[in-house]
Amino acid sequence: MKKSVFLGTLAATTMIAGVAAAGTLDDVKARGELICGSNTGLTGFGAPDANGNWVGFDVALCRAVAAAVLGDQNKVKFVPTTGETRFTALASGEVDILVRNSTWTYSRDNDLKLDFVAVNYYDGQGFMVKKDLGVSSAKELDGATVCIQTGTTTELNLADFFKFNNISYTPVTVQDDSEAQRQYLAGACDAYTTDASGLAAARATMADSENHVILPEIISKEPLGPVVRHGDNQWGDIVRWTFFSLLIAEEKGITKANIEEVAASTTDPEVRRMLGLEGNMGAMLGLDAGAFKNAISANGNYGEIFEANIGSATPIGLARGLNALWTQGGLQYAPPFR
Amino acid sequence: MSNSYVRTQMLPPQEAPIGERGAIKWLRDNLFSGPLNSLLTILGLLVVFYLVKLSLPWWLNSVWNANSLGECRDIVAAAGGESGACWAVIKARWHQYIFGFYPQDAYWRPVLAFGLMFVALAPVLYWNDRKGAIMVALTAALTVLSMVLLNTPGTVDLVAIVIMAALFAVAWLMPKKLIFVTLLYPFVAFFLLWGGPVWKGVATLLGFAVIVVVYRLLQSRLGVVVATAAGVVAAAVYWIVLQGYVTGALTAILPIGLPAVSSDQFGGFLLAFIIGVTAIACSLPLGVLLALGRRSDMLLIKTLSVGFIEFVRGVPLITLLFTASLLLQYFLPPQTNFDLILRVIILVTLFSAAYLAEVIRGGLAALPRGQYEAADALGLDYWQAQRLIIMPQALKISIPGIVSTFIGLFKDTTLVSFVGLLDPLRGVTQIVRADINWKGIYWEPYIFVGVIFFLICFGMSRYSMYLERKLKTDHR
Amino acid sequence: MALASEAPKESFRLSMLIYDTRYRSMTIQVVVLILVLLFVGWLADNTIQNLAAKDKDINFGFLWNRAGYDIEQQLIPYTNDSTHGRAAIIGLLNTLVVAFFGCVFATIIGVFVGVLRLSNNWLVSRLMTVYVEAFRNVPLLLWIILVFVVMSETRPQPRDFRVTDEMIASGTEPAAKMWFWDSVAVTNRGTDLPAPVLDRGLGSIDIGSVPVNLSVLLTLAVIVASVLANRALLRRARAIQEETGERPVTWWKSLAILFLPTIALLMALGFHLDYPVFKGFNFQGGISVMHSFTALVIALSLYTGAFIAEIVRAGIMAISRGQSEAAFALGLRPGRTMSLIILPQALRVIIPPLISQYLNLTKNTSLGIAVSYLDLRGTLGGITLNQTGRELECMLLMMLTYLIISLIISSLMNVFNSSVKLKER
């Protein structure tokens, strides 16, 4: 037993992941696995199921990146991070990419030395209250108790909103989403505030969803997106263009089901470039020619991922709203693939 | 002369008065011996009654078969109950509470490692007689049984049975030799849990062989300390420079091994045990060194030991865990990056080493001076005296303290959820509740996890009390 | 013939550094010193390199920046315009207040349970054993969460306390009622207590941006003065008793001296209680104590109380039976025996482990993270760290603070320990 001290040494010699080379891409390729920082469990966006398979909207983007880089969407490891540990995990190289409902802000982009490469979900902070509270606007919440999650931009927005409207409130800071919902349902707070998507998801899964209303005020902009380390532009571009390829696929009507068929028959030059049938666009990023084809065939295009995980057919039931393609009045717009 | 008025035969004893026998006497002695006691009894009864009344319906309406919390509630409502426990969540997710995301077809590996741990612990648990051998057999039987229940492939079961039978034979015939199992166990457990080629462990073991060889060669000429240092340096050189080649070569020649499992798949009680057992095992030698350092005559060594112990004991474990997850990367060479679990284990080891050092220092202080003097009189040098005279007694005295440190540490493994690891209490529960079917479930996971913790910790504390009695040889 | 020849003058050889016990310890210390210095240098070098690679520096300037977040429990004034440094101080005070109440209640619980466990009442001693074992063998984190959930799930919402005009008209009772003649409300958010208010208060002065209430200071001064006066009275009474054998009646004088001046002062200041009243969403007025605080105090004191109970029990059992037999022989009743003979002696055995329990409790307050209690870890090591991204500075500052708290507590308790230690002459 005493000799078990050596287990540490043993582990140290075998588990040190090795000294990272210059680029994240090379690391990932050498490792044969993408390490993706995820939520510790947020319904619809990223959580493991009963068998330990991670599923969700954010998770699907990670899988698409893994498919683009390594050709296999399952060559990805998910590292759960908390609100407090996520950016450090990314900065220290513990994860290659962070896809965890992180809001793109000025200080995070510049002070924390991170790069937000895209916005995969346009969100905004809202409030949910019980219907019988008789409140129809967030400005009527003077003196109310509000549940917020710590370690987010949410608490700063909330403080700003109440200060701006010159009304008072009692904050109840809560560690995670499920605990916040429990407190809200128990009536330990009058209002629950988080990203509107989270509110809608929470409301949809409540046993008595008809008794809860989401107030009309959206008090902030919350562009949520994948984050990479500052300074590794190639890797940032890979993540960004993998995401854009999913958008373009939706725009062009390429789905998981018909991608082979499209690849065989298409004459659209942009699609041909993207699927690696013409030119060698992948090589510019150090990827295979078929990288983006792999990314799309992993879990389908952006629309499919949205519908499968958080869309109106799921219990979460979010509408596309701002996240519709620009052609349908939303904000999701990909630059041309040429 | 006849004294007919003197009774010659004893009367049969009369039965005690009704208030002085049976249940009534017991009640009067134990529950109602005075006004204060009666009051306390009534208060106690009220508390018990209130608790039972509050929770009994909930327990009675337990639901075991359902696919979601909603179904559970429907079943309870259909039965006419107001509230009921929904144990179905445990039934659906128990494997995550025990193993985390460990691959399901490999559950036998942690189970086997767990069973072997008891065999390896046998010398420490003082199972070195026939009774101990029976305990080994029992452990073996339970391990194999659990493996079979977990649908382990037959060949693996067979191998396990053979290994366990061999261990039992060793325990029965030459219990002293079990110490070799103890020495090998860390490597075996590491191999079983993490998998990968078997040669990694073997090649690492060679490093210890290097230490032993160097030590043997130099000890007679240079003394214990220098020889040990030289051995460690030689081994370090071997591990850093040569081991990779040795492993590579051996793997190339004979590639045998288990499928690798990466540490992010560990969770639940498996994780709690890995952190707890590794940390306590690693911290024991460290704690001994720190305790000796604190009692040392050398000012510098003493200052360093005291500084380390007081620093670690002065900050909460949770800050050390955050250090592991946030700060350790600053202190290591740029770009090194290793497993969060390993970083947590390192910090937890340092944490418990400081506490163990204080426990062992207590044991050392409790030894009568005569023991030290006797060792000196025999002409033993410092390390011989420590190894042969002082430590065996000091450690024996410290057993209760060591066990309670371990219990504390084991309970504290729940805190790793705050740095994103899947501990059974919060980590796994959070994931279970992120599932749409089990959203809103609250009491059942906590009760389940709490009961398991209680059984383990209570068992350990009772065993340490038993050991304490068994090993008691009074000095005074 | 010389009996003892002069010891041969040994010339110094290098090997003596290892073999000669006179030099060996020196050698070892020098080697260790070099190794430690190398190690520290290595760490420092790594840190500098890492910081440079991330384009960061070590800079505590962020402590003077605007915090921007709100804290629900604040002992000194704080708004979201205050600085991160002030938020850290709020957190520190929150930590200390939990630690203080936790230690007090844990001691009370521990002493009672420790004594009751030795009671010859079968039921009570069993119940106490169940309590002690249950709390000692289950993680503290679980107890904190459970207590918090029990409080927020079983108590009514503030809205249930509402009494509307229609309800008065129809004579229906509200769903929940306040306790103690409408003065205390325990909702599922917190506990609302009446607050002492002064109509004609003396105002307050700011000492280093911490407002100090003059009325409170004055009241404290009056209380201290009355206690001192009472002591003088009792001393005089004792002197008279020793001189004449008769003790003058003092109880009413004592009472008057102890309470009248304070009551007079409070009346002069216009003292009254401000009762919490339900208005809008929550109770307004009075003092509101968050459940995260209450739950943390309850769980910490129950958990640590179980450990203290064991310490107390061991301390009592360490006192030889002869002591209690002697006390009984003197005619002392069991209760008096316990409080006059056993406990004071047991105290000497109890105090050293008690110190470490207090330290543990103080450190365990950091588990307030589980109920989102904003203590030092929640502010400095939580939100501030998160918003500013300065892990190194925040963590170092936080560890240093905890270390200082621990050292202060242990040195205070050591002073107390040496004052009650058996004086051996």
Image (spheres, rainbow, N blue to C red):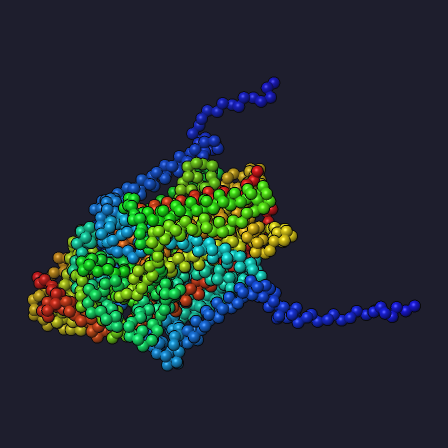
B129 relative position to C142: left or right: right
C409 relative position to B476: left or right: left
Residue at 14 percent across and 64 percent down: it is A245
In the picture, residue C26 is in which quadrant? top left
Instruction: Report the quarter where the C terminus of chain A lies.
Output: bottom left
Residue at 39 percent across and 65 percent down: it is C181
**How far from the left and from the top, in percent, is residue A149?**
27, 61
Residue at 20 percent across and 69 percent down: it is A136
Q: Is residue A225 something one can see in this rendering?
A: no
Most extreme residue toward the top, as rendered? C1
Label tally: 0
In the picture, residue B184 is in which quadrant? bottom left
**How far from the left and from the top, in percent, is residue A193?**
24, 64
C247 lies above or below A51: above
Most extreme residue toward the right, as rendered? B1
**How far from the left and from the top, in percent, is residue A9?**
38, 50
